[in-house]
Image: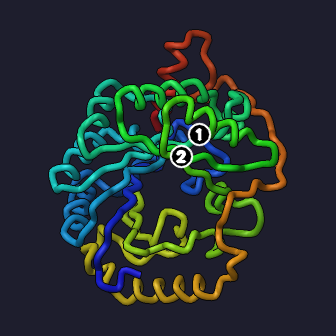
Amino acid sequence: MMDDGRISFVWLEITGRCQLECGHCYAESGPAGDHRRMQVEDWRRVIDQAAEIGAGMVQFIGGEPALHPALPALIEHARGRGVEVEVFSNLVHVRPALWEVFSRPGVRLATSYYSTDPNEHAAVTRRPTYERTKANIREAVRRAIPLRVGVVNLWEGQRSDQAVAELRELGVTEIGTDRLRQVGRGVRTGRAGLDQLCGHCGDGKIAISPSGEVWPCVFSRWMPVGNVRERALVEILSGPRTAEVGATLRTHFATRPRSAWPTRPKPLSAKFSPWKPPPPDHACAAAPDPRKRASSCGLKPRSR
């Protein structure tokens, strides 16, 4: 794992804030989250250091990265270093200025989609987001922005196959499927562990948290190898802790039975639980006027 201190891809988790509270969120993000300890200059420095050791692409994630006010500037900084950018957004709300940023060369989008049933979709995100996300997927396709969409199977009977078909009808050509990863709020039995990983953790890829922690990937959050606020990225990746974690991962993946490797996603034996609106005092409670609802739920999380 990264034994030579070189990487090709970096997840930059720039915020823990999100308008949604998805029941399977590995980052446990939500409206009460924040941008934590990493400042804009910290992220700029990390992008510079990643570019210097070979990173050809960064993915801005969260939380919802579109809620970070510095996202456009960070995208511009990465592109200035010749690094391609992907923004993994829930596509609940995209400001007009962000559409212009996303439309630039070398920038692409990714998002998640769960069902063709609005209520089933809301049962996942805990917000009535189906129509907004669908409309913004359509807008991204209209603008010819490269777009990748993932469909996650969470329970038996989920309309995930129909979601894939609908995405194709919308013009999306890059569609992936995945199973529930039992990390963060996704834990259903026991706790997060190596069996939840795909087998490519640290294979030229790393993730950096809003606090500066470096992980082999976004799912292996319990295996930090250092902190970019304390040491340069190249020092972390060539250090003893990274070597130790890399050896642990290699040993586990080498001995894992083939039957245990992720294949076609299988839903859990869970049942669909209808989404219920939050209480009236919640920041994202439905408002009678759609414009007021947009200002509270879909667009701006409650200030802390």
Q: Nearer the viewer, mark 2 or mark 1?
A: 2
Closest to the observer, 97 or 40: 97
Compared across the picture, whether 2 is left or right of 278 comes to left
76 or 209: which is nearer to us?
76
> Left or right: where does residue 255 sit relative to residue 67?
right
Q: Residue lying farthest top?
A: 289
Identify residue type, mark 2: Ile
**Residue 278 location in percent, x, y?**
69, 29
Q: Is residue 44 above or below residue 126?
A: below
**Displayed quadrant of residue 242:** bottom left
Q: Give above or below for 60 relative to 197.
A: above
Q: Which mark is residue 113?
A: 1
Q: Residue at x 37, y 53 (%)?
A: 59
CA–CA distance in space, label 2 to label 1 = 10 Å
Identified at 61% across, 29% down, the residue is 130
Q: Which mark is residue 175?
A: 2
Q: Residues within 10 Å of mark 2 (few under 14, many from 20)?
A: some
Task: Name the residue nearer the viewer: 151 or 69.
Answer: 151
Q: Amino acid at mark 1?
A: Tyr
The picture places residue 207, in percent across and down from the top left corner, at 41, 64
Percent across and percent down for residue 228 are 31, 69
Q: Is residue 231 visible?
A: no
Residue 9 appears in the rendering: yes
For marks 2 and 1 on the same chain, the one whose residue lies earlier in the sequence: 1
| CB under 8 Å between discs 2 and 1 | no
Q: Which is more toward the observer, 51 or 35?
A: 51
